[in-house]
Amino acid sequence: MFEFAWPWVFVLLPLPLLARRLMPRARPLSSALKVPFYAELSQRGGGGPGNLRNLLLLSVIWILLVTTAARPQWYGEPISQTTSARDLLVAVDISGSMETPDMVINGRPAMRIDAVKAVVGDFVERRKGDRLGLVLFGTRAYLQAPLTYDRQTVGTLLREAQIGFAGQGTAIGDAIGLSVKRLMQRPAEHRVLILLTDGANTAGEVAPLKAAELAAQAGVTVYTIGVGADEMVQPGLLGSRFGARRINPSRDLDSKTLKAIADRTGGRYFRARNPQELAQIYDELDRLEPVKQEAASYRPLKSLFTWPLGLALLLAFLWAAVPLLANARPGKARAIGRAESRLGKSGRRPAQRSGAL
């Protein structure tokens, strides 16, 4: 839809006519300079067909300038957009134990962190409308991606996470504390933290249960996920089956503390022994924390003032350039040169019309 942002500017259209009628005429002055081409100047400033063309051209330029000042613009069709008031942080353990190859992806052994990146990446992509953030923790916890609607960037930063960058320990309490601090900085109806780890709290300054109390006071719901298989075959000598034994790679997982954290904050504790269970957990989280669909729409706005302004500048340039080009024709230049030559030889001026500049 086309419209003018400031349509009242068109009241200025008759301003040049009012100025011509109301302002006093300039008093005639005595001739200060005699020029041989006064007749040509009279045709541009006085009556005649040339002056009529100039008047029409200047009128069009003035109309275009007023149209530019009125700010013409075009509104496009309404575009619907879904928004949510939820802030959701995902805290992922990148300690050394996440390299344990007790997961199976496409029939091949895979490290825990690879399964987490694949499943959590899909979960992040599905959270359209939520503000998402990413916290990575090991011995220390740090914010990798602040809360944002840019799901693609959050997924990219998760895939680029490297084991050991935050240390080899596991600071669960610090990760919760940092997440609560970030979530409290943003107003939201519902704040959610999803914490994923494969071990127990072995580092950091804040105890996990103390951090859970802070989260509960701040209205943050914490869902905890324990990752790791219950059984794994450890190869024997030189990778052969001879001397192979079965071990529990998740013996260090503190499920009791993770469950207590979830209970104190109104969340739930989940156990993921393989990628399939991990995917089911995030499907369950989608059900427990559905994306809030809030109807919102906007209409794209495109400003069009450059078109009348550009046309006005082009016409003004032509109005000024055409007389200069006409006066610079070779024939006229030679006639002026001959007149000046005769004037120089005789020492007196020929009869001519005069006018004041």
Image: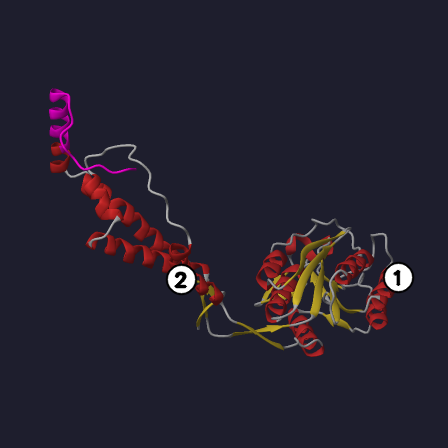
Which comes before the other along the chain, label 1 or label 2? 2
Residue sitting nearer the eye, 237 or 319: 319
Of the numbered discs in the image, which one, if any, rests on residue 210? 1
Q: Is residue 308 visible?
A: no
Q: Which element carries disc 2, helix, strand or loop?
A: loop
Q: Read off the residue under disc 2.
A: 14
Expressed as whole percent of the image width and height from the top left, the position of residue 213 reads: 87, 65
In-image side of 175 versus 352 (left or right): right
> Residue 108's image quarter?
bottom right
Please give the range of residues in magenta.
Answer: 336-357
Residue sitting nearer the eye, 115 or 342: 342
In-image side of 29 versus 70 (left or right): left
Query: How many discs appear?
Result: 2
The structure residue drawn at horizontal position 85% and vertical position 65%, both measured from the top left corner, is 212
Please identify the quadrant where the C terminus is shown: top left
Expressed as whole percent of the image width and height from the top left, the position of residue 320 reads: 29, 46
Residue sitting nearer the eye, 24 or 62: 24
